[in-house]
Image (cartoon, coloured by chain):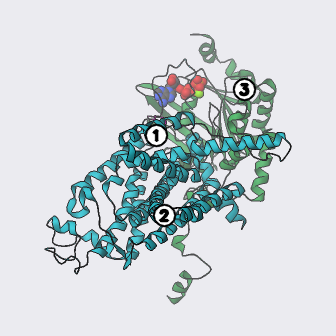
Chain colours: A cyan, B green
Amino acid sequence: MEFVKERLLGGKEGARGILILAVLLLIVFPLFLDIFRLNLVGKYLTYAFVAVGLVLCWGYGGILSLGQGLFFGLGGYAMAMFLKLEASDPESTKIQSTPGIPDFMDWNQLTALPWFWEPFNNLFFTLIAIIVVPSIFAFIIGVAMFRRRVSGVYFAIITQAIALILTVLIVGQQGYTGGINGITDLRTLLGWDIRSDSAKYILYFVNVVLLLGVIMIGKFVITGKLGRLLLAMRDKEDRVRFSGYDVASFKVFIFVLAAAMSAIGGAMFTLQVGFMSPSFVGIVPSIEMVIFAAVGGRMSLIGAVYGALIVNFGKTYFSESAPVLWLLLMGALFITVVMAFPNGLAGLWDKYKDKLNRDSLKNGFRSLGKREKTFDIKWPKITLPKFRKKETEVKGVPSNIRGDHA
Amino acid sequence: MLEQLRESVRRDEVFSFLKPSPSPLLGKNLDTSHGPILYLEDITVEFDGFKALNNLTLTIDDGELRCIIGPNGAGKTTMMDVITGKTRPDSGLAYFGQTIDLTKLQEYEIAQVGIGRKFQKPTVFPNHTAFENLELALDADKRTWPSLRFSLTAEQKDSINETLEYIGLLDCSTMLGKNLSHGQKQWLEIGMVMMQKPRLLLIDEPIAGMTHQETEKTAELLLKLAGDQSVVVVEHDMQFVRSIANKVTVLHEGSVLAEGSMSEVQNNQKVIEVYLGE
Ligand SMILES: Nc1ncnc2c1ncn2[C@@H]1O[C@H](COP(=O)(O)OP(=O)(O)OP(=O)(O)O)[C@@H](O)[C@H]1O
Ligand SMILES: [Mg+2]
């Protein structure tokens, strides 16, 4: 019980935050929104999975990934492949020259199902692949980069490049992937029509429950020693390393975890929206995900959810009335948040709450038992990747200057 | 055969391949039977043609407190970088005890086998409390999974509080690292190194920024640490060095210029030239 309270909910404060979020998502929204809008909210919430992962790996671990769309996409595509195969039974595709394969394959003159599509006939395999495939991807990227101590801006650019490569690949390999249109026309999950209103309701609730679960996993990580180590690593990596910790393996861990979370979001996206396309994989969506986390507060798991919701409400509202304006607005929003509110909405909320607390303290209502804990803004430092063994420090420091290169 | 099978599917045990294998280094015993705990031979480190260390040879005995002095740029910090794996030597041997080749280990592995280091510029975790700073340094299983599940035992809590008291920070245990004074940061970092339970402590310029009183306390602390552990202290303050050292090594231009007691070293002609001449 103590464990659940302290580690999964993050203490009393954290439990309250989760409770408010749960009430909002599970009761208020379903009561007051029609199914069309609720489905829209469900779609936004799939981005929140990515944002929560970013809080862990960027906010706490200091690893800014501008390629989370990659993992969102892999999860989403895995789900889409299963649904597409189910929608492509020989009966409903009998007008094709090769019945029984997805329509886009037929259009691209494929005559048999490619080998890597085969296992996606199986739902159990698909569910595992949704988590495992992106995790393996993240693991390989993580090991390759973090063992070489690539970090900061360099890492961000590389993740961006990888996301771009995957998009190009998906678009280019039309016959295997559905190309720029993506995988569309998904209908049923084991015979259950996912386009019906009742299915949309159920999927929305499944989505919310999974999201709350992911948040609790995140809380579990950050409330423990590993969370403190991540923060320590972000601030003083060398001190962590010389205290006997393998910094690279922590980074790989948190990066893989964030990737797995994003992938769940991707799969839920496919289920709720009914298709998956490369426009959710590439550079722009990946950067948008970072903006959600930044607006919500990069140190707050729950803030990230609100960030995803609010930015997307704004996006939907403005992109209907003035699409160009929205892009500018989003840029401005991002810069404002980063410059003025480094801890995002959650930071504002904390400040406001502290003020309330202090006021009540003044009036002698209740004492303020909260420990001071603020965070500096810390954007990725440009550190050269160490490909050679000795390139640790700036070279050519005159020997008469007292160096502090320790 | 059946026995074996039964053994491997016992219910009260996890499959053995699922058990975390203990780090191979943790079991490796430090062998100091021949005296020295640290052994450097002919270490050379070159930065773009400039030799920061030049055929440096140095041994530290088990339990010894050694002071290392030398002008700015003599290579003192670089020597610590080599010992802790931060910089790889271009040539030379570096052994910890008789068996552990330091040039083959990663920085974190070197820390795990028992070498702790305090940096020249005080390096503590700014957004963690003093208590948490020590908790993170605490000697425990430091791999990812155990760190995720870690929780402090009562004993460990006590030992952290003891250390806090020892370094005079018990009253500041909930203060964030960044809000401590310079001297307090220095102490906290020494405390962190102590928490690692190292066999060898490398302390780079501990008293920079300390008041006279704090300096005295630091001297006391270092003297107390030596004996059970070996301590190597780099310091510019001669008076401080005199107060703690029985053996002093003078580094100059990357190699050992002189070695001996403080008074021997002070009367050494070459040392006088280096410090007063030029
Ligand atoms: N990574 C590096 N790249 C290039 N030169 C370096 C590097 N690290 C150290 N040096 C140079 O090597 C020399 C030795 O430096 P070191 O820091 O070891 O001196 P030190 O004895 O610790 O001096 P101080 O008393 O100022 O701390 C200096 O001239 C320094 O500029
Ligand atoms: Mg130095």
Position of residue A214 measured from the top left corner of the image (x, y, whole percent): 54, 61
Position of residue A66 measured from the top left corner of the image (x, y, whole percent): 41, 46
Instruction: Identify residue type, mark 3.
Output: Val
- CA gap, disc 1 and disc 3: 41 Å
Q: Is residue A328 visible?
A: yes
Q: Is residue B256 visible?
A: no
Label 2: chain letter: A
Q: Quadrant of the C terminus of chain A?
A: top right
Task: Report the residue marked by disc 3.
Answer: B241
Instruction: Identify residue type, mark 1.
Output: Gly
Dominant secondary-structure state across the stretch colored magenta: loop
Task: Report the residue marked by disc 2.
Answer: A34
- Vertical placement of residue B14 versus A375, above or below: below
Question: Residue B87 vs residue B154: left or right?
Answer: left
Instruction: Identify residue type, mark 2.
Output: Asp
Task: Report the residue marked by disc 1.
Answer: A152
Label 3: chain letter: B
Tags 1 and 3 touching, CB below 8 Å: no
- CA gap, disc 2 and disc 3: 78 Å
Front position among marks 2 and 1: 2
Position of residue B230 measured from the top left corner of the image (x, y, whole percent): 68, 41
Front residue (pair B146, B1): B146
Residue positioned 48% across, 47% down in the render: A311
Front residue (pair A109, A16): A16
Residue positioned 44% across, 73% down in the render: A199
